[in-house]
Amino acid sequence: MDQEKKKILTISGVGKSFGGLHILRDISLEVNKGERIGIIGPNGAGKTTFFNLLTGDLEPTRGKIYHYGTNITKQPNYKRVRNGMARTFQKNNLLNELSVLDNLLLVLQRKEGFGLVWFKSRGTEEYPKLYQQAYELLEKWGLAHQQDAIVKNLSYGEQRQIEILLGVATEPSILLLDEPTAGMSQSETDYIVDLLYKLPKDLTLMIIEHDLDVVFGLADRMVVLFDGGVLVEGTPEEVRADEKVNKIYIGSGDEV
């Protein structure tokens, strides 16, 4: 694979401050196509702020961010989505009064380039391709039985499944998942992990996750944030064995 095509994200010396409060300091990282990167660290380490900088929800105070070699540091979030970056949030970001199918159709409508055509009928006769894509996605991810369910009536875990599905539906080149299994039962967590394992291998994943069993099982590279910077970066095995990481998480020299 061509080296430039392989390198999907380059984060160079990125930092974020709010007044005199320094949330992130000098974060530098390269992300390759198809990698699964776990982002871990204690509360307040700056993990979600880091995602907000990558997706354009916040602008860095310093440093630059490149997507496939293009400087996107000041690019608004909707353009990053259009260019292949998608994310989920710690809290569900769904239209709760609509059905699962309607939530998915709105995402697909935007992806197909007619997201603003709100004044025309959007039925199966007018947009058969749109509905076919939606049905195929729901079937593929085992959610066809929920297509007519109103989102607010679903369990929290089911809503998280739908949100990940919406992210995948945009056909991104990189998907950022912020605490995908937070607040879930073990069975719901197992379902999400299985879903993530089934994602296309060329889809790059960056995952913030407090469940260490989940993230160590999914990731092929780990980044540990602490006190606004990168404390350790390496394979899951290297990070598990690192004394500094173990001290931060469990207050002893025992392995994570």
Image (cartoon, rainbow, N blue to C red):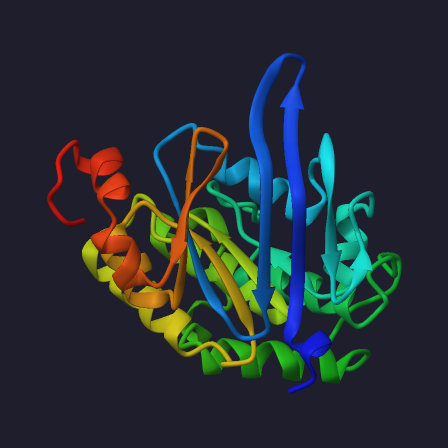
**Furthest residue in direction front, as rendered:** 243
- Near-viewer residue (190 or 203): 203
- Residue 250 appears in which quarter of the rendering? top left
- Residue 235 appears in which quarter of the rendering? bottom left
Q: Residue at x 63, y 62 (%)?
A: 102
- Near-viewer residue (166 or 105): 166
- Near-viewer residue (187 or 234): 234
Give the x, y percent position of residue 96: 54, 46
Q: Can residue 124 be seen from the camera position used here?
A: no
On the picture, is 69 further left or further right than 221? right
**Position above or below: 52 against 5:** above
Q: Residue at x 80, y 72 (%)?
A: 112
**Position above or below: 242 against 21:** below
On the picture, is 112 further left or further right than 172? right
Q: Residue at x 13, y 40 (%)?
A: 253
Q: Quadrant of the N terminus?
A: bottom right
Give the x, y percent position of residue 243: 22, 43
**Position above or below: 33 against 10:** below
Q: How many marks?
A: 0
Give the x, y percent position of residue 192: 35, 64
Q: Can residue 58 be seen from the camera position used here?
A: yes
Give the x, y percent position of residue 35: 50, 70
